[in-house]
Image (tube, rainbow, N blue to C red):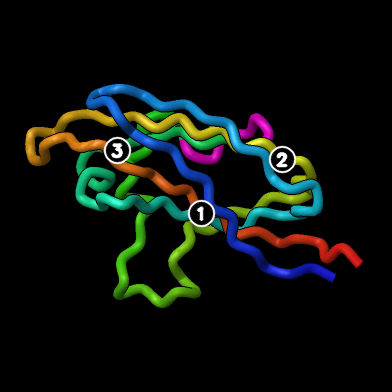
Amino acid sequence: MLKIVKKRFDIQVVDANKSVNKTFELDKNIKRIKGMLVTSDKDDLLYYRGTQKIEVNNQEYFPDNYESKLLMSGINVSPNERYYKIETDNIGNGIIKLSYTDADDGRTGFASYRVSLYVDCEMEDEL
């Protein structure tokens, strides 16, 4: 039986105008990724300063310099509609690579911030 789970993966952005690369492992019983969402503890910095590249099992889903604001969702969106929909199959022991880049845009001052990648998954129940 499959159940829906949300996985959260965090990176810390501590330096202005730098990239942070991180690799995350999915549980072996994750069967499919249904969607992704990016958020932050400082949404304005993520919105104006952030871009990223996201790969799952070496397949690129969002290319280099993909703007973070395109993967964010506001509170005016239904919780069931907040994720950017993607479909993957047979992910088991999947690897997510996140390459996040902070870049000064002139509208915001830099402060250290957290970027969170939420992944909407189908997981096989272990009996």
Q: Is residue 84 left or right of residue 56?
A: left
How far apart in space, not on screen, are marks 1 and 2 (Cα)? Answer: 15 Å
Question: Label 2 near label 1: C-beta < 8 Å?
Answer: no
Q: Quadrant of residue 97?
A: top right
Does dot 1 land on a helix, a strand or a loop? strand
Q: Position of residue 50 (x, y in %)?
A: 29, 38
Local crowd size for mark 1, using a 10 Å CA cut-off: few (<14), some (14–19), many (≥20): some
* Looking at the image, residue 38 lies above or below residue 83: above
Residue at mark 3: 50
Q: Could you give the CA–CA distance between mark 3 and mark 1, rounded to whole angstroms?
A: 16 Å
Residue 67, given in percent of the width and then of the height, sits at 32, 41
Of all residues, the one furthest to the left in this rendering is 106
Residue 49 x, y percent position in the rendering: 23, 37
Quadrant in which residue 65 is drawn:
top left
Amino acid carrying mark 3 in the image:
Gly
Q: Which residue is mark 2?
A: 94
Disc 3 crowd, CA 10 A, few/some/many (<14, 14-19, 20+) = many
